[in-house]
Amino acid sequence: MADGDPRHARTNTASRPALALFAVYVLLYGGFMALVLFRPDLLSLQPFGGVNLAILYGMGLIGSAFVLAAASMWLRVDG
Amino acid sequence: MIHQTSPMAVAIFASFVLGVLALSFWLGRRGQSASGYYAAHGQIHWFVNGIAFAGDYLSAASFLGICGMIAFSGYDGFLYSIGFLAGWIVALFVIAEPIKSLGKFTFADALDSRFNSRGIKLAAAISTLVVSVFYLIPQMVGAGSLIQPLLGLPHEAGVILVGVTVTLIVVTAGMVSTTWVQFIKGSLLVLFCGVLTLLILGRGLAVNAGRDGLEDLAPQLLTVRPDGTRLVDRQPQSRDHDLRPVGTIVRLPERFGAARETGPLGPVAYLAALEDSTIVTWEAAKRTDAEGTHTTYTPTERRGADLLKPGVFFKGLSTSRLGDRLDFASLMLALFCGTASLPHILIRYYTVKDAYAARKSTVVGIAAIGVFYILTLYLGLGAMTSGALDPTDTNMAAPLLAKSFSNTLFAVISAIAFTTVLGTVSGLIMAGSGAVAHDLVENVFGMHMTDHEKIRCGKLAAVGLGIVAMALGIVFRRFNVSFLVGWAFNIAASANLPALVMLLFWPRTTRQGIIAAVTIGMVASLGWILFSADTFEKVYGLARDRSPMPFSQPGLVTIPLGFLVLVVVSLLTPPSAPPRR
């Protein structure tokens, strides 16, 4: 869709799907913070490939930011 | 440590700086309007703007600071990467489109879109200046750190070189040249960090990398006398008698048998092998007496598994002290909330033509920034085990890692790091320049200016900010740059985010509520930082326990305080304007 499409011309507040995706990320980030603060022992577990949960969860948070960002584009276009 | 300079490094560095300046002068050769100077006419393509977001955001703190912190403290540096990226989710889903629709040139334009209030413009302009100045400090410190090994010039020369170059970039073509410098810098940074990561994986892990014999694990002592002369282990420092470079593996995992090298490793195998290795990291302890300041660097053998989980830098995470945990939680909250409140990031939304382009450019920015932050983990760990670290300067980890491969790569990476500083500082000076000229002079003081006068006023403000930035970069030279950026995020999140979010989502928000939230959020977070234990220790040289604050990072208290103040004041004052819908 081209820039300047009238459907996207002016938006003064965030859309509902965007806020739902934001809530998903807040839960993921909150879960990570809870582990670091209250159960750091779990972060030493190695669930995959000999790499610990601290690294997997951290990289997962970075990766999920992009996935949610891409999803927001898709939802908006088809929505 | 005394670093040797090479003519090639100087040549590559000079070509980068001259190239950037030539581009700025070329872009600035045409006549300008205020819209062009402050917002690039709103005509930047969304993809270019997205990469420029990365160039604007991936500062010295991200590149030099995080790599250095991972190299010396392991996983804790990666926590900054996670927090810095998470903030973009707030920017994308909550702020991006509305801010584009509400504003014109500056953050104050958006906040004031419903009210036409001089009070809001004044509060927002001051907040922009305070946040920009706090963010400028670590960028300038990073510049000073780089220039020493690259050109053999003192820290002050690096700071002045950046200050002068950036001021020239901004005054030649404003937001247009700033955008293109940031685009080039963002592209080069991600590309060459990728190259460096491939080299790290190709080299794999090795016992005592970078040296022929065994790692010398004797502590090292650096004394700096009051007259500035430096002693290493009680002897005058020279190229022949200097501190030893540090950062090595002393044992590889058992599965590699008697081998002293792993050979090339994949990205997962690299992390797994490091987790089961034993690594030597170095910590500094400082004391001062009549002879001068003595810093002892002491080695510690650590299991890789301990370095790859939180708790080495954020020591409070492994203790039961509540204040330490709250300090960490407060920092991570500030990183999450701060990105979308940084004025130099917000003004980039005005350089694209509409709200949809603003969102697309944010997605591109998240992709570039996310890839970079994943690479920082490998760069930091690669530096940690390279045997090339300077124990006196955590900020030099990434360039010295590059030097462990080749002098050419060192020169290129240092030049890119320098360009990194240029890109971010130019964005910050643009934001500050807009706050002074557009918000304060024109809107608050009511000085009506022609288009030409607006540009001249912005350029004068840019020169003034450049001078302030240089002075601060020299004063704060000993700080880790990531640590300093944490302060800027705290102030931005406390002063700006509550007002922005409530303006967008709560129709009952009043003019007085916004002014109070910005002012109290800014004053409270700034005051908290100035009275914190970290500032007592590292700025005033006082004992930590003399600080009245329970923890150093203010966000956990001052961000909710900003929301609370806004709600209470808004409810106590009459609605300033009809609700938007």
Image (cartoon, coloured by chain):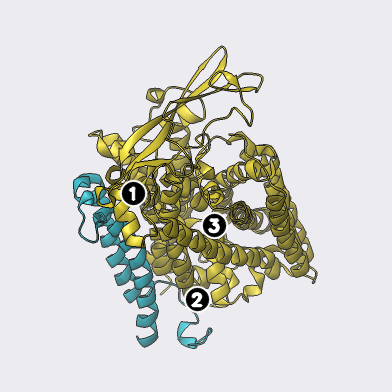
Chain colours: A cyan, B yellow
| Label 2 and label 3 in one chain | yes
From this view, report whether residue B458 is shown above or below residue B359.
Answer: above
Q: Position of residue B207 (x, y in %)?
A: 39, 44
Q: Position of residue B475 (x, y in %)?
A: 61, 34
Q: Chain of mark 2?
A: B
Counting other residues with Cα less than 10 Å from the Cα at mark 1, is it few (<14), some (14-19), or many (20 or more)?
some
Residue situated in front as seen by the camera: B9 or B417:
B9
User: Which mark is on residue B259?
Assistant: 1
* Element class at badge 2: helix
From this view, report whether residue B469 is shown above or below residue B268.
Answer: above
Residue situated in front as seen by the camera: A65 or B300:
B300
Dot 2 amino acid type = Ala
Question: Which numbered mark, 1 or 3, is in the foreground of this view?
Answer: 1
Cβ–Cβ below 8 Å for labels 2 and 3?
Answer: no
Dot 3 amino acid type = Pro
Res. B119 in view: yes
- The residue that label 2 is drawn on is B355
B231 on left or right of A79: right
**First of labels 2, 3 by sequence position:** 3
Question: Which numbered mark, 2 or 1, is in the foreground of this view?
Answer: 1
Residue at position x 69%, y 44% in the image: B151
Q: Chain of mark 3?
A: B
Residue situated in front as seen by the camera: B493 or B109:
B493
Cβ–Cβ below 8 Å for labels 2 and 1?
Answer: no
Quarter of the rendering occupied by the C terminus of chain B: bottom left
- The residue that label 3 is drawn on is B343
Residue situated in front as seen by the camera: B479 or B175:
B479
